Image: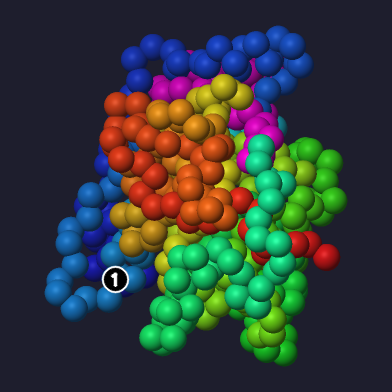
Amino acid sequence: MMPCLRLLCAALLLAATGAAGAARIDDAVTRELADRGHVDVLILLTDQSRPMLAPLAPGADYRLRRRALVDTLRDRADAHQSELRNWLAARGIAHRAFWLVNAIEVRLAPGELEALAARPEVARIAANPRIALRLPPSRSAPGPAAPAAVEWGVTTIRAPEVWAAGYTGQGVVIAGQDTGYQWDHPALKRQYRGWNGSLADHNRSWHDAIHAGAEPNGCGFDQPTPCDDHGHGTHTAGTFAGDDAGANQIGVAPGARWIGCRNMAAGVGTPARYIECMQWFLAPTDLTGANPDPDYAPDIISNSWSCPASEGCTVGNELDGAVQTLVDAGILFVAAAGNDGSSCGSILDPPAIHAAAFVVGATNASDAIASFSGRGPLAGGDPIRPDVVAPGVSVRASETM
């Protein structure tokens, strides 16, 4: 890293603040520990602030700011987490550290929770529940009778008119975190950033956040090649970039490139998996998880998942900070409005509730709001949500093969 950037990072690195007394422990943590004898948690450290970076000079490369942001976040995590990581390692407690959010994921056994909560750098010990993907109840509602070369949803939003003007998404990289992706699907292969037309290289174009100990699933764990054990991710990729160069123009931006991260095993995610994918997008690594490089970050991130409090997801502030940091880095964070409509105030869960997210609701073939699609206003937040709506009922896209 250039010396001036290192000095900037050091100057912006905030000092750790000590917590008075024991850390807050979520009720769900103590309940699960009592019921199961172990519990997966997120240790949230005291400093969860976002770095404040100086504005770039006019005409400067935006990547300079992104690199400085990543360096500052990584330096903060190293400074605040080092003693805690050593403490965990000395006790043989497996852990996974994050820098996008100042947090560490661990599995705790009885006798470890109280000692951990007493450490001064620990602010909160949060639950890390396993959350099943909730699909719209009207997934099978009827759409147009027959497939078209250009799918009806793409035509409805008048994307072909934009293509005719010369804009197909060329030069843009779209990322998705979902159930995984079938990268070599005929409608997706040409657009995958890890494919150069003759060879595949998945470094910095694919990450698997599903590790040993996760739910049994059809892909396994830590897959070095993109895989989708559920089909939802492959479907959504087709919606944003699918095109088989033939009679299946199913995607809105067929000239874009795409990359992916698997954040669910058999359709089940956790807050730690969501954070891991978001962190990887900001600085994609190679397949070993090393050499993060923010120059490979996407321009847009597509998110069709939710983290509902009703299912134990209580890491809302930290997810909010993660989304805002990605937006600070110049990345458009797109989130589905959710499937809890049709009443007002039915956008309920992260990431759609976060102010920095660009929220998309669903319409049907009659161009009316889908009955299941979430609606604003947000509780104590934006009165107008979603930001836009688009076809989301019986949309034909790329299905796993």
Image quarter of residue 318: top left
Outermost residue, left side: 58
- Residue that appears at 68% across and 46% down: 141
Can residue 211 be seen here? The reply is no
Say how many tags the image has: 1
* Side of 182 relative to 342 (left or right): right
Magenta stretch, residue numbers: 107-136
Image quarter of residue 65: bottom left
Residue 277 percent location from the top left of the image: 56, 52
Residue 333 percent location from the top left of the image: 42, 54
Q: Nearer the viewer, residue 181 or 89?
A: 181
Q: Secondary structure at mark 1?
A: helix
The color scheme shown is rainbow
Point out the image quarter for the N terminus. bottom left
Q: Is residue 120 magenta?
A: yes
* Side of 202 relative to 321 (left or right): right
- Residue that appears at 19% across and 67% down: 56
Q: Decide: is 7 above or below 186.
A: above
Residue 192 percent location from the top left of the image: 62, 75
Q: Decide: is 236 above or below 95.
A: below
Q: Is residue 114 magenta?
A: yes
Q: Label 1: few (<14), some or many (≥20) within 10 Å? A: some
- Residue that appears at 49% across and 65% down: 156
Q: Which residue is mark 1?
A: 62
